[in-house]
Amino acid sequence: MGYAQLVIGPAGSGKSTYCSSLHQHCETVGRTIHIVNLDPAAENFDYPVAMDIRELISLDDVMEELGLGPNGGLIYCMEHLEENLDDWLSEELDNYMDDDYLVFDCPGQIELFSHVPMLKNFVEHLKRKNFNICVVYLLDSQFITDVTKFISGCMASLSAMVQLELPHVNILSKMDLVRNKRDLENYLNPKPTTLLAELNRRMAPQFEKLNKSLIELVDQYSMVSFLPLDLRKESSIQYILSQIDNSIQYGEDADVKIKDFDPDDD
Ligand SMILES: Nc1nc2c(ncn2[C@@H]2O[C@H](COP(=O)(O)OP(=O)(O)OP(=O)(O)O)[C@@H](O)[C@H]2O)c(=O)[nH]1
Ligand SMILES: [Mg+2]
């Protein structure tokens, strides 16, 4: 059994930074995780890259040879990955053993988890390889300055939830940038009625019915709940990691191992 986090979220929401902070944190506490780059457009990394989609396909080549733009090129790369799940990905995964913990740093184009089946097939492949997977969805804290942005961020997360059908943790990233702490209370665990009132206040009256349905939808999936991530605080990363670990049952076997360990036996 392996363990995996699939780190997704809108462009620039802090996914790669989260991956590198997580790596650092794990190093500090003496735990091993492997970060996988799934973004064919990424160039600089603050973490050691364990596996890299750019070894399979280069976005520059795709754009040049097929005359595609950056987003079309990215979709092409991801489809190429999808076609190579059984060879390239499987071979790469063979380098890891039972109990290994992989973190997949995904590209920020939300099409990948909202429109195209690529990520779904990727996840199915990992499941067949016996991975327990948690989706980690990052939303930039700046989204809470505006209820309409916040709702659209929630809908994107919801679409990933519905498509991927995996344990799912929502994170509000870049907490160091939040000025108004009172705003925050309203958004980490928002009351549907508060959100609705706010939406109605922002939008023309003809949208009231639509707003109500939207909020009900988001509420029914009980997904409007975010964990705050403040990279300045080790405890914040630690807490988030423990929630994710819980959702994929990581550490339950480890507990057994610790119990089996005989301290006199050194
Ligand atoms: N202040 C602050 N800035 C952050 C934080 N996390 C990320 N950033 C900045 O936000 C920008 C985007 O961060 P990335 O980690 O590259 O975001 P990403 O989601 O990987 O972006 P894409 O892969 O392009 O979708 C960078 O300029 C980061 O330095 C944070 O916790 N606080
Ligand atoms: Mg990134």
Image (tube, rainbow, N blue to C red):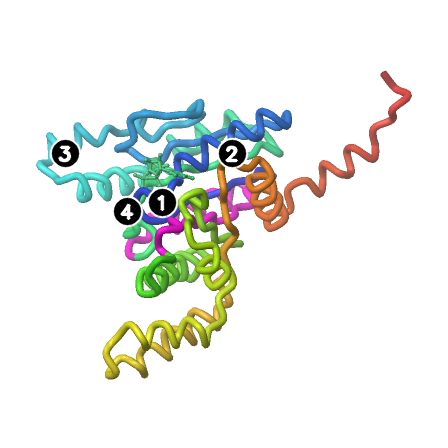
User: Is the CB atom of the residue marked by disc 1 within 8 angstroms of ligand 1's nearest atom?
Assistant: yes
User: Is the CB atom of the residue marked by disc 4 within 8 angstroms of ligand 1's nearest atom?
Assistant: yes
Mark 4 or 3, which is nearer the eye? 4
> Start and end of the magenta stretch?
115-143
- Disc assigned to residue 109: 4
Residue 212 located left or right of residue 187: left
Residue 13 on image: x %, y % = 36, 45
Residue at horizontal 46 percent and vertical 73 percent from the top: 192
Helix, strand or loop at disc 1? loop
Residue at horizontal 49 percent and vertical 56 percent from the top: 226
Gap between marks 2 and 4 measured at Cα: 22 Å
Q: How many residues crowd mark 3 within 10 Å: few (<14), some (14–19), many (20+)?
A: some
Q: Amino acid at mark 1?
A: Ser
| Residue 263 part of the magenta segment | no
Q: Nearer the viewer, residue 122 or 87?
A: 122
| Residue 122 part of the magenta segment | yes
Residue 197 on image: x %, y % = 39, 76
Q: Pointer 2 and pointer 4: residues touching (CB < 8 Å)?
A: no
Quickly name the residue at label 3: 63
Q: Amino acid at mark 4?
A: Gln
Sequence order check: which comes first, mark 1 or mark 4? 1
Mark 1 or 4, which is nearer the eye? 1
Mark 3 or 1, which is nearer the eye? 1
Helix, strand or loop at disc 3? helix
Mark 2 or 4, which is nearer the eye? 2
- Disc assigned to residue 22: 2
Q: Nearer the viewer, residue 81 or 246?
A: 246
Quickly name the residue at label 1: 13
Gap between marks 3 and 1 measured at Cα: 25 Å
Q: Is residue 41 above or below residue 228?
A: above
